[in-house]
Amino acid sequence: MKDGLSQSTVNCVLSDHQGVIWIGTSFGLNRFDRERIMSYNNDKDNLFSIPGNDIIFLTEDIQHNIWIGTDRGLARYDRSKDRFMRITFAGLPLHVHSSVVTDNGVLFFGTGTAFRYSYVDNRITFLPVNGPERVTSAFTHAYIYDKQKQIVLLVCRRNGLWWYHLATGKLERISFIPAKEITSVCLDSSGNIWLSVYADGVYGYTSAGDEFCHLNTGNLLSNDVVLDIKEIDGKLWLATDGGGLNVYDPDTQGMRVISHIPGNNNSLPVNSFGCLYNDQEKNIWAGSIRGGTDRFEKNLFLYLW
C-alpha cells in the first residue's frame, strides 16, 4: 500500500493488450502503467465510477474491452474517457462472478445464471440453464473445456464442478469429482483437470475422469490450502494460504517452494497468496492476502529448474 495500492489483499490481476497491469483488490481497482498506480473506487455520487469496491474478476476480450466484476455488479471500462460503464440487465445491476472469452463474445456466470455478451450485437443476453439440480451457489470460475462441443467447465466454491453445454443450456454435475469445496481449477495442456479442495491439497484427474495424483502436506505441498493453480511452461504454480508458492513439475514429480524467510529481504514478503497471473511477457504476478502483489520475472524459472 505504500506504493499506492488501494488495498493489500489482491483478488485478481490482468495485463491488457497495452501492457497496463490492472490489480483488483478487496477495496478498489488499481491501474499500474509500470511507473505509477492509479486507484479507482466506488463513488455513490458518480454513476461512472466502479459499481463496487470488492473486485471479483478482470477480463479483457478480443475487442480489448476490459470487464470488471465487482460485489455490486459488472462494469466495462471506457478507455477514451477513463470511466466505467455499469452494466444492467432488465433494469438491474448485472451480478456475475466469473467470465470466459470466446470467439463471438464473452460468457458471464452468476448464481446459477449465465449470460452472453455478443461482439456483433454489442449487448448482453440471457442464456438458459437447465438441469436436474437447481444451483443456488455462485459459479466462481469458468473455463472452456471443449471448444468444438461448446462445453464449459464451471466451478461452485461450495458446490463442486459442473459441465455447461452452451448449445442446449444443459447443466450437469461432474460425477467423477466428488469434492464440493473447490477453491481453484486448472486445465493443463495435456487435457488433465487439476483442482484444489479446501484444506485437502490438489487433485489431478485425466480427461477420462481417473484420479492420478493427490498433492498434500503428507507428500510435497507446504500447505493444504491452495487458492489458485496456473500451468506455466509445463509446471503447476500453486498459491497457498500460509505456505508461500509451490511449483510442481508433473514430469519429474518434483516440487519447489518459494516462501517468506524471516530476515531475508529477497524472499517473499508474506506466505499467503490468493491468485496467480501469467502476463504476455511470461512474468508471473502473485496476488497475496494482506501483502500486495509480487512479480516474478521469467528468468526466475531458469533458477528454479
Image: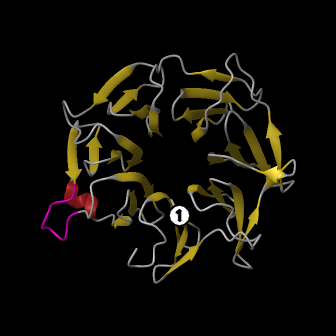
What is the quadrant of residue 17 in the picture? bottom right
**Residue at x 15% of width, y 60% of height:** 261
Q: Residue furthest left?
A: 263
Query: Where in the figure is residue 48, as x and y percent of width and height?
Result: 75, 71
In the foreground, 20 or 24: 24
Q: Is residue 246 left or right of residue 160?
A: left
Query: Where in the figure is residue 262, as x and y percent of width and height?
Result: 14, 62
- Asked whether 27 falls inside the magenta stretch, the response is no
Q: Is residue 49 above or below residue 35?
A: above
Q: Amino acid at mark 1?
A: Phe
Q: Is residue 89 above or below residue 182?
A: below
Q: Main secondary structure of the magenta part?
A: loop
Query: Where in the figure is residue 129, as x and y percent of width and height?
Result: 75, 29
Q: Residue furthest bottom?
A: 35
Write down the region rendered in magenta: 259-267
**Residue at x 71% of width, y 20% of height:** 131
Secondary element under disc 1, as helix, strand or loop, is loop
Q: Is residue 170 left or right of residue 18?
A: right
- Asked whether 264 falls inside the magenta stretch, the response is yes
Q: Is residue 63 left or right of residue 37?
A: right
- Residue 281 in sight in this render: yes
**Residue at x 33% of width, y 67% of height:** 297
What is the quadrant of residue 236 in the picture? top left
Query: Where in the figure is residue 250, as x and y percent of width and height?
Result: 29, 37
